[in-house]
Amino acid sequence: DAQEFWNSKLGLPHEAKGAKVSDADIKQCMGNYTMPNFAPVSGLITMGVDVGSVNHVVIDQWFPKHGVPNHFDVNMRHVKKTLKLITVPEFEDLIELFMDFNVICGVIDAQPETRKSKELCQKLAGAFWRCYYSNGGKGREIVKDEDDAKVSVHRASWLDMSLRRHQ
C-alpha cells in the first residue's frame, strides 16, 4: 500500500521493505538451464517483445494450476515456464521465432518503432498485438482496438503484476 501511494499517487520512487532482490535470491535462481530452439510438443505459448535498439524477446509456456478456484484472471490460474530469452536485431526475426515456437498470442511495444510494430501485427493478424502504455485508466484494465490490433494498458499496474508473478 505504501509503495502504491508513493509511486502512483505522488509519482515518487519508493522501495518497500523486502522488495529488493538480494544476491542470495539471484544465486537461488541459478542453475544448469537450457533454452530450446523450438516449441515443446504441446502447450499454450506466448511471446512478448520489448522494442529498443534491438528487440528483446521472451517466449513463455503456460500450465494450468491445479486446485486453484476458477479465478477471473487467467494469470492467477496459470504458472509459466520461460522457454526463451533472446535479443534479435530485425523485426523479420520475430516472425521466425513466432513460427518456430508455435506462439498462440504475442504482444509488442508499439513504440518507438510504431510503423514496424504495426507491420508485424498485420503479418500476424489476430495473433499479435501492439501495446501502448498509459498512466490513466483503471488498474489492470485492457482497452482493445481489434480493428487496429492494439491494446492500451496502465503501465504501473501491469508491470507490478508481472513482477509479483515472479515472486
Image (cartoon, rainbow, N blue to C red):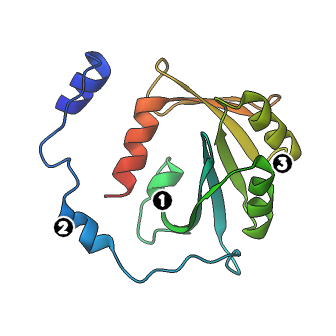
Residue 132 lies, with reference to residue 127, above or below; the image says: above
Q: Nearer the viewer, mark 1 or mark 2?
A: 2
Q: Which of marks 1 and 2 is nearer the N terminus?
A: 2
Q: Is residue 27 left or right of residue 145?
A: left
On residue 77, which mark appears? Answer: 1
Q: Position of residue 98 (x, y in %)?
A: 75, 60
On residue 124, which mark appears? Answer: 3
* Dot 2 crowding, Cα within 10 Å, few <14, some 14–19, many 20+: few
Residue 153 lies, with reference to residue 74, above or below; the image says: above
Residue type for callout 2: Ala
User: 57 or 128, which lies in front?
Assistant: 57
What is the quadrant of the N terminus in the image? top left
Q: Nearer the viewer, mark 3 or mark 2?
A: 2
Query: Which SS class for mark 2?
Result: helix
In the picture of the structure, the residue carrying the numbered disc 2 is 24
Pointer 1 and pointer 2: residues touching (CB < 8 Å)?
A: no
Question: Which residue shows up at 69% across the image and 36% down it?
Answer: 130
Q: Position of residue 34 (x, y in %)?
A: 52, 80
Marks 3/2: CA–CA distance: 41 Å
Question: Which residue shows up at 70% across the image and 74% down it?
Answer: 39
* Dot 3 crowding, Cα within 10 Å, few <14, some 14–19, many 20+: some
Query: Which SS class for mark 1?
Result: helix
Q: Position of residue 127 (x, y in %)?
A: 77, 49
Question: Which residue shows up at 66% across the image and 42% down it?
Answer: 108
Marks 1/2: CA–CA distance: 28 Å
* Dot 1 crowding, Cα within 10 Å, few <14, some 14–19, many 20+: some
On residue 12, which mark appears? Answer: none
Residue type for callout 3: Leu
Residue 2 lies, with reference to residue 97, above or below; the image says: above
What is the quadrant of the C terminus in the image? bottom left
Could you tell me how many numbered marks the image carries? Answer: 3
